[in-house]
Amino acid sequence: MWENFQTILKSYDAALAAYQRGQLSRNYLFELGKPSQLLLHHGVEDLPIMMFQRTVGKTIDKHGLLLLEILHLPLAIRIPEAIFLSKSSTESRVLLLRTQQSHLPLAVVLTKTQYNKEAVNELKTIYPKERSAIAQWQEDKLLLWPINQDIDSRP
């Protein structure tokens, strides 16, 4: 099922194009690859990372992101800027991503779940996160993997 990462990227790009044309069902699953060693080291299980089409829809409709801002998502989740514990679930991790297209850091939530009787890491949501809220996560001691510089000093 999981060939090399280039195949994942091509498949993701093709699925995003189909989404843009309105050709994907609401329950379509985007395959985003397997967790990187960094994610595995910080509590993400060694399971496929999947995202429902409806999550993409919510990202655009509710959170106001552009499709362009999640274009490189399979790569961005492999090398997050930071990894946080979730306040609401011990099974979840919140990844902080930076993309060239996004003016704010993006928070994505990965949660272990079942799909067709198989365990997967579901990417549940993608939303822009204000720097002040990220600083609060740090104050709350949720940071697992460091942000290398002060949040306010970034462009």
Image: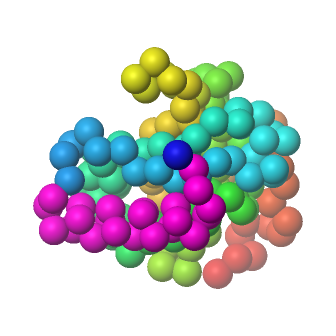
Inspect this view and state whether residue 51 appears: yes
Residue at coordinates 81% horizontally, 51% vertically from top-left?
Answer: 38
In the displayed structure, would residue 53 be above or below residue 7?
A: above
Q: Indicate the colouring scheme.
A: rainbow
Residue at coordinates 15% horizontally, 59% vertically from top-left?
Answer: 23
In the displayed structure, does residue 30 sit left or right of residue 77? left
- 132 part of magenta stretch: no
- 20 part of magenta stretch: yes
In the displayed structure, does residue 60 sit left or right of residue 22? right
Q: Quadrant of residue 109?
A: top right
In the displayed structure, would residue 121 be above or below residue 81?
A: above
Inspect this view and state whether residue 110 appears: no
Locate residue 77, reporting x and y percent: 62, 57
Residue at coordinates 52% horizontally, 53% vertically from top-left?
Answer: 32
In the displayed structure, does residue 138 sit left or right of residue 16? right
In magenta, the rendered stretch is 2-23
Main structural element of the magenta stretch: helix, strand or loop? helix
Residue placed most toward the observer, 89 or 139? 89
Q: Quadrant of residue 60?
A: bottom left
Residue placed most toward the observer, 40 or 119? 119
Residue placed most toward the observer, 66 or 1? 1
Count the labels in the image: 0
Q: Quadrant of the C terminus?
A: bottom right
